[in-house]
Amino acid sequence: MKEYKFKINGTDYNVSVEDPEENIVNVTVNGTAHKVELADMPVAPAPVVRPRPVATAAAAPAQAAPAAASGSGDAKPLKTPLPGVVLEIYVNVGDTVKAGQKVLMLEAMKMENSIESDKDGVVKAVKVSKGDSVQEGDVLILIG
């Protein structure tokens, strides 16, 4: 919940705004509660964030078996530092990367975050796809 103090035409307003659920927000103005419908709120991000982790988790075991079979046991996982949505993937399996090289773009809290390799190596596996939702600590890429 966020709280604001507004002054409109010389009148003070104390406003509390809760996080939206779908396109409805609970707003309290000077102690009076209101349900506010957001007309211009993009509805698409909510479904992307909620259902995708289930689909990604279901697909992960299928991807894990080939990666293990290819000898990626020495590969180090590059994990996401925060939850978000994968916007772009800049590397493919077999690519050589350097420490500090941008390998993925992650959108989190409406900001784009560059994810960089933390070591030199070869991309052994890419565990996510463009558009996937990820949680903090999820493995994005294996680098060996």
Image (cartoon, rainbow, N blue to C red):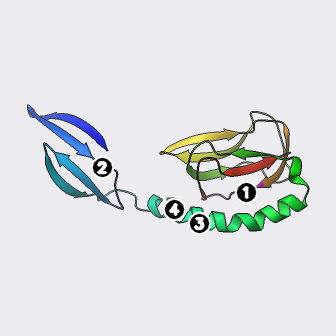
Q: CA distance from mark 2 to mark 1?
A: 34 Å
Crowding near the residue tagged with mark 4, few <14, some 14–19, many ≥20 C-alpha atoms within 10 Å: some
Q: Is residue 57 above or below residue 142?
A: below
SS category of the residue bearing label 4:
helix
Q: Which residues are magenta?
A: 126-130
Instruction: Assign the C terminus to one quadrant of the image.
Output: top right
The location of residue 88, given as percent across then percent down, is 65, 51
Number of numbered markers: 4
The location of residue 122, given as percent across then percent down, is 86, 45
Q: CA distance from mark 3 to mark 2?
A: 26 Å
Whether label 3 touches label 2, CB < 8 Å:
no
According to the image, label 3 marks what residue?
A: 54
Name the kind of residue labelled 1 in the image. Answer: Lys
Residue 113: quarter of image? top right
Q: Is residue 27 left or right of residue 96?
A: left
SS category of the residue bearing label 2:
loop
According to the image, label 2 marks what residue?
A: 18
The location of residue 99, given as percent across then percent down, is 79, 34
Residue at the image position 63 percent from the left and 40 percent from the top:
114
Crowding near the residue tagged with mark 1, few <14, some 14–19, many ≥20 C-alpha atoms within 10 Å: some
Residue at the image position 74 percent from the left and 33 percent from the top:
100
Checking the image for residue 127, the label placed there is 1
Name the kind of residue labelled 2 in the image. Answer: Glu
For this rendering, which residue is in front, 58 or 45?
58
Mark found first going from the N terminus, 3 or 2? 2
The label nearer to you, 4 versus 3, is 3
Mark found first going from the N terminus, 2 or 4? 2
Q: CA distance from mark 4 to mark 3?
A: 11 Å
The location of residue 69, given as percent across then percent down, is 89, 62
Name the kind of residue labelled 4 in the image. Answer: Val
